[in-house]
Image (spheres, grey):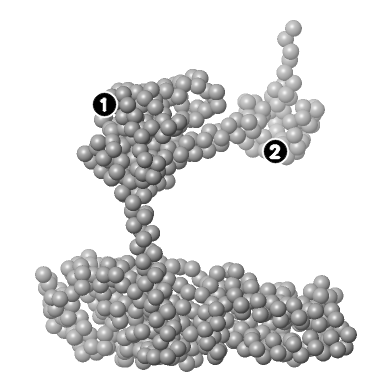
């Protein structure tokens, strides 16, 4: 049902390019752009045939705003900025926040360095990449440093006075501009070689290195010849690790999409210097039934919002490719061609990207299915095994840990829908039980835990679990039952005995043994092991604190500040015992009564 606010605004829509912002209760839920705002926005409310996603969105719209633009290009750029700013629920939002590394060279410096940058900036420097993964960019830098003797130090050159060159100069890895061993023109020639190499002109570099190797060998300079030979091998080795796909020096991104009626997967193949250097997959939940052209166009806008586009983008389809080209050209600062190839080598690349997208979507769905079986599916199986009427949404596991009854502690871990909810975990110090009595300790802990559901603390009542797991067999389970009844609550619970991984239920004389491959068994084993780990970790931390307890902490009137000052001054308790009262008075913050108290505590009188 369209409200009066929306009806009024629909009647006043102009025939103009611009962006529209759909709202629900004041929150922007979708941002779109249109060549004609009147036709585009009205279509949402006057057309009944919508995809499920659009239908769900339209049902929530109670208001909208528009922003007029002069051209479709302005609208496209504005849409990109608005989505980035507001992150609307119904727009495609890329959750992959990785920033892949670039190689950066700032030719504005007198003696440029080759560095790694995670983000591209408009700082006048040249950026090459992105390189998928740290190993790829490390390989490139290692090759560059062996083949091109550029400096790696961060000194601000040129220096007022030359200094002694470092070891990199001695081994032929640096021209040592800091020591005046080269001119700026000589250094710049090497920088130009690096830039040529990063642009994909590898053959020119290897040919040059080969000539230099032959010349050094002819001059009996075998050390230099060996360096050139090793540099050639490193370059060839790096190239072998990259898959060659064509003979030109293309800088391309290949975009493709796969849909399954529910979700979608966008795929990007990254090609630099005519070689695939990596690929990325992006899950697009809820986009599986939307028009593929719209999804891929919106994805491209989000993808290049924080990335520099390459010279060429190949894609099977794109809305208004010419406008997209103009937007990306403005971002890159040079020509960008968006191509929809129909045949040939470029079409083969698009098909390859589509196959990768379909494979990534299939694997994601398979992973989700396995995850579902191991979490919610395992809970459903456990519900049947236990004989519960209610799905065990919240399962709590308990365990006891102590060392011969000393420093007894307990842990409570929480699994919600089969997954650990770490923020819900709790520790307990055993207060009423002395000695190594795990049964009574379990009873105390569960009594305290269930009592929390009977009162409110800090305005929040603890949530009652749907199912409780105790680590142990029938005896442990009996004490847990007593605790529950003493508080006056009724919660399904069971024990898991470790020896045979038996499930013990209250009132049953025989245990239940599940198949070793059962998801339910794997789930409760995971809960038991997590409770054990959490209890052991807490117990060890308490034991460590007890072992590092200082005798100074037992002296009345000696607080943390004085303890620190004493230990800093003397270095140890032993040296402190050797000191007299006047020596103790030299410590900052010590009064005579305090010094006398410390002295007496460290020199107790022995009664005869």
Label 1 neighbourhood size at 10 Å, few (<14), some (14-19), many (20+)? Answer: few
Q: Quadrant of the N terminus?
A: bottom left
Q: Does the image show residue 84?
A: no
Residue lying at the far right of the rendered structure: 220
- As rendered, which of 523 and 74 lies closer to the eye? 523
Can you give x and y, in whole percent of width and height, for residue 524 in the image?
38, 40
Dots 2 and 1: beta carbons under 8 Å?
A: no
In the picture provided, is 215 more to the left or to the right than 433? right
Q: Which label's residue is closer to the chain start, 2 or 1?
A: 1
Residue underneath mark 2? 565
Q: Quadrant of the C terminus?
A: top right
Residue underneath mark 1? 488
Please give the name of the residue rendered at 42% of the width and 37% of the height, measured from the top-left corner.
528
The vertical placement of 297 against 455, above or below, is below
Q: What SS does tag 1 mark?
A: loop
Nearest to viewer (mark 2 / mark 1): 1
In the picture provided, is 364 more to the left or to the right than 133? left
Please give the name of the residue rendered at 68% of the width and 82% of the height, measured from the top-left corner.
112
Can you give x and y, in whole percent of width and height, for residue 178 in the image?
79, 79
- As rendered, which of 597 and 126 lies closer to the eye? 126
| Residue 161 quadrant | bottom right
- As rendered, which of 26 and 298 lies closer to the eye? 298
Label 2 neighbourhood size at 10 Å, few (<14), some (14-19), many (20+)? Answer: some
Q: What SS does tag 2 mark?
A: helix
| Residue 56 quadrant | bottom left
In the picture provided, is 314 more to the left or to the right than 493? right
Please give the name of the residue rendered at 55% of the width and 75% of the height, measured from the top-left corner.
131
Residue lying at the far top of the rendered structure: 608
Q: Does the image show residue 388?
A: yes
The vertical placement of 575 against 289, above or below, is above
Can you give x and y, in whole percent of width and height, for residue 124 in the image?
58, 85
């Amino acid at each position: 049902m369209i409200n009066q606010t929306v009806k009024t605004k629909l009647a006043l829509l102009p025939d103009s390019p611009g962006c529209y912002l759909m709202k629900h209760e004041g929150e922007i839920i979708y941002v779109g752009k249109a060549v004609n705002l009147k036709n585009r926005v009205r279509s949402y409310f006057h057309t009944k045939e919508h995809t499920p996603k659009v239908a769900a969105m339209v049902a929530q719209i109670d208001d909208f705003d528009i922003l007029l633009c002069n051209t479709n290009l302005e609208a496209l750029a504005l849409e990109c900025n608005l989505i980035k700013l507001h992150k609307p629920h119904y727009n495609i939002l890329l959750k992959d926040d990785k920033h892949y590394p670039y190689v950066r060279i700032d030719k504005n410096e007198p003696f440029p360095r080759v560095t790694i940058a995670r983000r591209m900036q408009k700082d006048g420097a040249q950026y090459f990449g992105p390189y998928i993964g740290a190993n790829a960019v490390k390989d490139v830098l290692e090759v560059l440093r062996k083949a091109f003797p550029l400096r790696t130090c961060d000194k601000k050159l040129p220096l007022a006075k030359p200094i002694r060159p470092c070891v990199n100069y001695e081994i032929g890895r640096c021209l040592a501009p800091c020591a005046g061993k080269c001119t700026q023109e000589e250094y710049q020639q090497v920088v130009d070689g690096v830039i040529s190499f990063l642009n994909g002109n590898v053959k020119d570099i290897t040919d040059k290195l080969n000539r230099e190797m032959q010349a050094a060998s002819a001059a009996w300079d075998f050390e230099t010849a060996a360096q050139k030979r090793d540099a050639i091998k490193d370059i060839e080795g790096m190239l072998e690790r990259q898959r060659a796909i064509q003979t030109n020096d293309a800088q391309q991104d290949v975009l493709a999409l796969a849909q399954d009626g529910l979700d979608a997967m966008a795929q990007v193949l990254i090609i630099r210097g005519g070689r695939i250097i990596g690929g990325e997959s992006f899950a697009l939940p809820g986009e599986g039934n939307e028009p593929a052209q719209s999804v891929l166009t919106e994805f491209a806008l989000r993808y290049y919002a924080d990335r520099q586009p390459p010279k060429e983008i190949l894609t099977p389809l794109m809305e208004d490719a010419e406008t997209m080209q103009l937007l990306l050209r403005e971002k890159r600062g040079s020509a960008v061609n968006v191509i929809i190839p129909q045949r040939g080598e470029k079409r083969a690349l698009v098909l390859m990207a589509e196959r990768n997208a379909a494979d990534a979507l299939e694997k994601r769905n398979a992973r989700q299915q396995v995850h579902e079986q191991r979490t919610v599916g395992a809970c459903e199986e456990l519900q049947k095994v236990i004989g519960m009427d209610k799905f065990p949404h919240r399962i709590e596991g308990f365990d006891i840990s102590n060392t011969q009854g000393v420093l007894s502690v307990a842990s409570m871990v929480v699994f919600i829908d089969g997954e650990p909810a770490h923020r819900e975990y709790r520790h307990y110090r055993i207060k009423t039980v002395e000695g190594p009595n795990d049964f009574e300790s379990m009873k105390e802990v569960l009594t305290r835990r269930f009592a929390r559901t009977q009162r409110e603390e800090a305005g929040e009542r603890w949530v009652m679990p749907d199912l409780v797991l105790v680590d142990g067999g029938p005896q442990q389970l009996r004490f847990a039952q007593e605790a529950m009844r003493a508080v006056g609550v009724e919660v399904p619970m069971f024990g898991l005995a470790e020896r045979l991984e038996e499930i013990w239920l209250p009132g049953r004389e025989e245990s239940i043994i599940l198949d070793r491959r059962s998801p339910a068994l794997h789930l409760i084993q995971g809960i038991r092991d997590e409770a054990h780990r959490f209890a052991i970790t807490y117990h060890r931390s308490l034991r460590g604190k007890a072992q590092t307890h200082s005798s100074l902490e037992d002296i009345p009137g000696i607080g943390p500040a004085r303890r620190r000052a004493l230990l800093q001054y003397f270095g140890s308790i032993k040296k402190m015992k050797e000191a007299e009262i006047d020596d103790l008075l030299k410590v900052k913050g010590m009064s005579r009564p305090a010094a006398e108290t410390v002295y007496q505590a460290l020199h107790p009188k022995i009664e005869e």
